[in-house]
């Protein structure tokens, strides 16, 4: 096997050391079910013209946000991108205030002035979704460097797409993080496309994760449909960072089930191409393991009903919230 072609890390069952108890699996299943239901609702609200600006669904990619953010410590920094509702929810931001933000309402986490593209909540260490492709990587480098200079060891995770992986900013950020041994976990969510361009047509390597060693950091290539495989890689990368050994690059092989954004109805792939990914859906894969462990069927029904209620409540809360006041337009724009 060449360096450019490492094996995709998968788990057939669960890791042999029994690293996950029933509560862990249930927590992860619920987290992914919430992300799924939330973005289904957002897509529906967008088609009803209740959302100003574009939104990008994370549907199909939930194992990435869930498996990684399980491991980000409470004082860690999260850098997301525009496909970031799932990241915000997995970090524990309240669904009702996230929904209000997406709808541009005053009770949103940014007072309704950020929207889907700019979900940010410093209290959660969530330093932002971002509409600029690859913007989060250098920001993660900056945050961890600032912490390091202050004598704090605070890790960061930076999520980005396969398209972003080849931008100049991404290369520069990964290089400097390695030079300065910063505790950044770079996570490329490779969903195979950048809008309409296939990853195979624009990325020089078969596996983005294989670039890790070229930057002087470990590179992991992981089955991004499998939350356990993702979480195992996350544990390895955060342990590497905590030991003072610096950054890691993790590539998650995944797929987005929906179009690039709600505003991009034209799709460039066939149903046949998507089908194998849906067969290995993150919720289905995890449920298979939980069934094997004897989780009762009605637990899944109750959990899906409960998250649907959380999302309904979030929508109600958001729709009842007023738009931001005109008088506040220039508030929160400039730092004091
Ligand atoms: C710097 C910059 N260049 C171009 C764009 C336009 N743009 C928005 S999304 C996107 C595709 C990015 O694809 P990828 O990184 O694979 O992420 P995905 O949308 O697949 O999750 C592009 C080119 C942008 N927002 N920012």
Image (tube, helix red, strand yellow):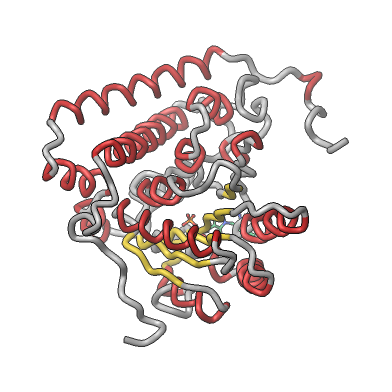
Q: What number of labels is visible?
A: 0
Which corner quadrant holds the C terminus?
Answer: top right
Residue farthest to the right, as pictured:
336
Report whether 106 appears left or right of 298.
right
Report whether 322 appears left or right of 281.
right
Q: In the image shown, does 197 or 13 lie closer to the viewer?
A: 13
Coordinates of residue 257 in the picture (x, y in percent): 33, 49
Q: Quadrant of residue 245?
A: bottom right
Coordinates of residue 299 in the picture (x, y in percent): 19, 28
Query: What residue is rendered at 36% in x and 44% in y?
Result: 59
Query: What residue is rendered at 63% in x and 35% in y?
Result: 121
Residue 215, relative to residue 71: is it above or below? Answer: below
Which corner quadrant holds the N terminus?
Answer: bottom left
Residue 2, relative to residue 253: is it above or below? Answer: below
Coordinates of residue 261 in the picture (x, y in percent): 47, 46
Residue 23, relative to residue 136: is it above or below? Answer: above
């Amino acid at each position: 096997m060449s360096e450019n072609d490492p094996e995709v890390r998968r788990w057939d069952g669960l890791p042999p050391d029994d690293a996950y108890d029933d509560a862990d699996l249930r927590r992860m299943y619920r987290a992914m079910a919430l992300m799924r239901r939330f973005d289904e609702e957002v897509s529906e609200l967008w088609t009803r013209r209740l959302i100003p600006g574009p939104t990008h669904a994370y549907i199909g990619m939930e194992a990435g946000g869930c498996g990684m953010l399980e491991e980000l410590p409470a004082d860690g920094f999260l850098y997301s991108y525009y496909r970031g509702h799932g990241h915000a929810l997995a970090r524990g931001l309240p669904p009702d205030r996230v929904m209000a933000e997406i709808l541009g309402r005053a009770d949103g986490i940014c007072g309704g002035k950020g929207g889907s593209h700019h979900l940010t909540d410093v209290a959660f260490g969530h330093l932002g979704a971002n509409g600029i492709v690859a913007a989060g990587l250098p920001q993660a480098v900056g945050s961890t460097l600032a912490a390091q200079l202050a004598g704090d060891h605070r890790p960061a995770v930076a999520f980005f797409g396969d398209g972003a992986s080849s931008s100049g900013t991404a290369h520069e950020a990964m290089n400097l993080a390695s030079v300065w041994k910063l505790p950044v976990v770079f996570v490329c969510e490779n969903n195979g496309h950048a809008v309409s361009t296939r990853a195979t047509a624009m990325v020089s390597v078969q596996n983005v994760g294989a670039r890790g060693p070229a930057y002087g950091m470990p590179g992991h290539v992981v089955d991004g449909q499998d939350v356990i495989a993702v979480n195992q890689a996350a544990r390895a990368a955060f342990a590497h960072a905590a030991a003072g050994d610096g950054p890691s690059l993790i590539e998650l092989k995944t797929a987005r089930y929906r179009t690039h954004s709600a505003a991009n109805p034209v799709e460039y792939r066939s149903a046949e191409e998507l089908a194998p990914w849906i067969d290995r859906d993150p919720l289905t894969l995890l449920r298979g393991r939980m069934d094997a462990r004897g989780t009762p069927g009605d637990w899944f029904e109750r959990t899906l009903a409960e998250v649907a209620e959380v999302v309904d409540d979030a929508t109600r809360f958001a729709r009842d919230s007023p738009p931001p006041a005109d008088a506040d337009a220039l508030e929160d724009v400039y730092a004091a």
